[in-house]
Image (cartoon, grey):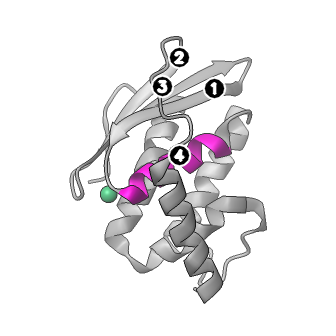
């Protein structure tokens, strides 16, 4: 990862950790899911409000490391206003990015701000922190009853 992206990564993580977006409970959610990353101790609760197949609102609660929190914060911004199908595409692209499936120098145009997470692929333990909110969001989308765990 080049220096510029590395610095941007630090900046985005710090910013979203300090002031996470959509960090609240949602009383009128249509579906929700809980996730747990035993390796790091991150816990998360994702709330979705879906109307006519569109994610009209998304929020999260929980506690965990800076990476899990920043990733959740960015996830909420990334899927809000998207259709369920579009949200699934973003989910897939993000997972491909952080697990290295897009290669070392991925084309990150489609990913916008999420691109800063490209560096996470160098740290396998952190991949679980970064992906927790996303797996949990996907479970909520699919209305899965079971709790999500990264193990
Ligand atoms: Zn973590």
Q: Where does the N terminus fall, quadrant-wise?
A: bottom right
The residue carrying mark 4 is 73
Q: Are discs 1 and 3 less than 8 Å apart at CB?
A: no
Q: Residues within 10 Å of mark 2 (few under 14, many from 20)?
A: some
Magenta span covers which residues? 66-78
Side (left or right) of 63 relative to 8: left
Point 72% across, 70% down: residue = 108
Would the CB of label 1 be found within 8 Å of ligand 1?
A: no
According to the picture, the residue beneath numbered tag 1 turns out to be 57
Write down the residue under mark 3: 143
Does the rendering let one see residue 44?
Answer: no
* First of labels 3, 4 by sequence position: 4
Q: How packed is label 4: few (under 14 Cα within 10 Å), some, or many (20 or more)?
A: many
Residue 42 - label: none
The alpha-carbon separation of the residues under discs 4 and 2 comes to 17 Å
**Residue name at image x 57 percent, y 78 percent:** 7
Q: Is mark 3 within 8 Å of ligand 1?
A: no
Q: CA distance from mark 1 to mark 3?
A: 16 Å
């Amino acid at each position: 990862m080049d220096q510029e992206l590395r610095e941007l990564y630090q900046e985005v993580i710090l910013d979203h950790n300090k002031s996470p977006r959509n960090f609240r409970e949602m009383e009128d959610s249509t579906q929700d899911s809980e996730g747990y990353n035993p390796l790091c101790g991150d816990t998360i609760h994702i709330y979705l409000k879906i109307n006519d197949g569109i994610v009209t609102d998304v929020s999260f609660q929980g506690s965990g490391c800076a990476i899990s929190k920043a990733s959740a914060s960015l996830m909420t911004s990334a899927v809000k206003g998207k259709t369920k199908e579009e949200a699934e595409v973003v989910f897939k692209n993000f997972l491909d990015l952080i697990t290295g499936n897009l290669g070392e120098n991925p084309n990150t145009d489609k990913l916008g701000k999420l691109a800063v997470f490209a560096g996470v692929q160098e740290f396998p333990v952190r991949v679980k922190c970064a992906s927790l909110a996303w797996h949990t969001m996907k479970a909520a989308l699919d209305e899965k009853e079971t709790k999500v765990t990264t193990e």
